[in-house]
Image: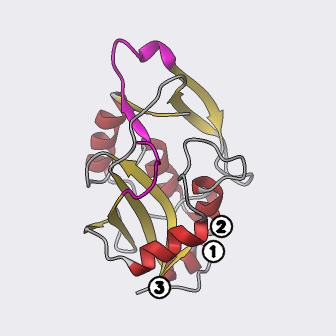
Amino acid sequence: MNIALTDFARARLFPADGRRTAIQDITPAQFVERLNAEAPERVIPGYAPFCRLHVHRNWTSTKCSVIPITGENRHQLRSAYEARTREELPVLVRWFEGLEPPVANYLVPILYSREQMAKEDTPVDADWGIVGCLYTMDPDEIPMVPITMMRNALGVEEGGSGVPLDRTAYRRSVAFWTSHANWR
């Protein structure tokens, strides 16, 4: 099995501006090389048969991507309408500003199969393409953000994957994201 980094993930995980919310201390090539050389500690089935998550111990200084919302930090939440790419429609997102999260214990790349990548018109020259990465304290998946679940259900034309909405998973996601937010 081999893994490649998609252009979509490269722009989000290794942005040109070097933001602190990105993967730190390594290049995209070093990241992919390590994922191809090192077996994951755990493989988690994704939300569809074409998706899987590989759990790796964090070997970088990358910080956790998600922080619990508390009474002490709620005033630092911000929101705006944003799109991940020029082609996608903006959606409401929220994040913390001014917080310093801990270094993540795990990097959890999100992988799509070569067949799914071709279906989404982003072919990869590997068995699996990296479409994202979670930076977590525990070796587990963070629930997909509710709007991402909806976008996926809308189909490839709207930046999704075409997987129908799972109402139970959606409710679990809402419960998690009601009490957590990303940071910038």
Label 1: how many Cα within 10 Å (few below 14, some 14–19, many 20+): some
Please give the label number shown on residue 42. none
**Of callouts 3 and 2, which one flags the residue occurring earlier in the amino acid sequence?**
2
Return the residue at label 3: 127
Which residues lie in the magenta part? 58-76
Query: Is residue 15 found left or right of 99 in the rendered image?
Result: right
Q: Quadrant of the C terminus?
A: top right
Is residue 135 or residue 119 the one in the foreground?
135
Q: Say if 174 sits above or below 32 in the image.
A: above
Name the side, left or right, on which 12 lies relative to 71: right
The outermost residue toward the right is 86
What type is the residue that disc 2 sits on? Asp
Q: Residue at x 40, y 87 (%)?
A: 1
How far separated are the C-alphas under marks 2 and 1? 8 Å
Q: CA distance from mark 3 to mark 2?
A: 16 Å
Few, some or many residues within 10 Å of mark 2 (<14, 14–19, 20+): some
**Image location (x, y in percent) of residue 16:** 72, 52
Mark 2 vs 1: CB contact within 8 A: yes
Q: Secondary structure at mark 2?
A: helix
Q: Disc 1 or 3, which lies upstream in sequence?
A: 1
Residue 169: tell me if it is visible.
yes
Residue drawn where x is 54% and y is 59% of the image: 160
Q: Is residue 66 above or below residue 3?
A: above
Marks 3 and 2 in Cβ contact (< 8 Å): no
Along the line of sight, the residue nearer the viewer: 110 or 20: 20
Tag 3: amino acid: Asp
Indicate the amino acid at tag 1.
Answer: Thr
Q: Identify the residue under disc 2.
A: 7
Q: Which residue is mark 1?
A: 122
Magenta-highlighted stretch: main secondary structure? Answer: loop
**For residue 47: magenta?**
no
